[in-house]
Image: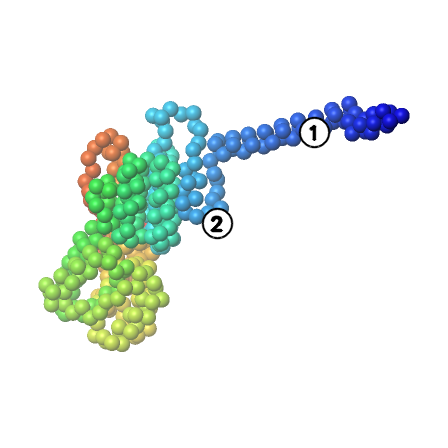
Amino acid sequence: MKEENMQEDFGEDVPTPGKKKKWLLVLVACVLAAVLFIGGYLLRGWTDPPQTIAPTMSPIQQAVTQFSPTITGEPESNRLIRIGFAQCDLIESDRRKANTMSIQNALNTANGYELIVADGQNDHDIQLLNVAGFIQQGADYIVIAPVQENGWDAVLQQAKGAGIPVIFVDRTVNADDDLYVTWIGSDFKAGGIKAMEWLESFIDSNPVKAVYLQGVLGSLPQVGRSVAFDVACVANGWENLSGMSVDGDAAQAKEIVADWLEQFPDLNVVIFEDDNMSSATIQAIEEAGQMAGGNDGITIISFDANRRSLQLALDTEKINCLVESNPLQGPYVADVIQKLEAGETIPKTIFVDDAVFDWRGLTQTIIDARTY
């Protein structure tokens, strides 16, 4: 009797043959599902390049994600040249947008390049993270439009250690020459000299009483143009009434010019380093009851020469002289990279071509031919 009870109790804990098969099938199904899920995830991660970047990603995460490896099946000789472009700010101005577009057009896939553009948002620390991301992911070349001149040595040393050539565009940096290949951009001092030569010719022997709205103090454009202006003032006996940095802020520019017109009612020349300040400057002059531009108004000299300001000069004659700071630097970058690929030596400085526009010689055809 006791043995029968023990056998009955023990028999209740042992699954029947039907239950045993059911549990085995469930276990196998779970294992297969897990394998398929993990395998599909890994496959997607290596074959599909990312289409979008989540807004919450840091700049370095963006760079790492966009430079993730892909399987193309192509031999190394046919591989796209991988470029990381660290732009200082993608929406800073019309000129900056044109600079980005020029780089994108020159370094596209049809020309043999894989280009990733990273936005520095005018923040040096963010831009350093962008460059570090390009280095980490093994870019072939890095192109930088720097936010500022200083603070580049550490990341440039990293790029050099990784064997990645660095090309600077538009703005220069304070760094050892052996840490980067070349700098491509405008000769800002030469542009300033061209503007002063134009003013000397236009003003003839009449006195000059000038005010100067400057860009970012200490930047290459501001320093080069200011030197040219100061030298011209000394050489010609012109009066430099006042100067101030406004960094493209139109509202601030208008306020400053209005104050200057009250302080210096006989000022006859206004110079500003950013075309985006043109409308505000003209408005301040006219609200003060004076005339802007032309042969008889306050002489206006502007830098950058974007289409909008050239059109304003043509339509209203309220801007007298516009000096170009050519942002179309993409073809120059592509040329440098191709020469490096061929083992050629590159000069340390490459100047782009800049033009000077007198309002009296402007035509709609000239403006329509502009790309920015």
In the foreground, 364 or 189: 189
Image quarter hosting the N terminus: top right
Q: Residue 213: x, y in percent? A: 26, 64
Q: Which residue is mark 2?
A: 56
Looking at the image, tell me whether mark 1 or mark 2 is earlier in sequence order: 1
Looking at this view, is 288 or 351 the one in front?
351
Q: Which residue is mark 1?
A: 26
Residue at 20% across / 50% down in the picture?
Answer: 187
The amino acid type found where label 2 is placed reads Thr
Label 1 or label 2, whichever lies nearer to me, is 1
Quarter of the image holding residue 226? bottom left
- Give residue 288's position: percent from left, percent from top: 30, 74
Q: Nearer the viewer, residue 66 or 125?
A: 125
Q: Residue 143 at what x, y percent from top left?
A: 31, 42
Q: Secondary structure at mark 2?
A: loop
- Element at badge 1? helix
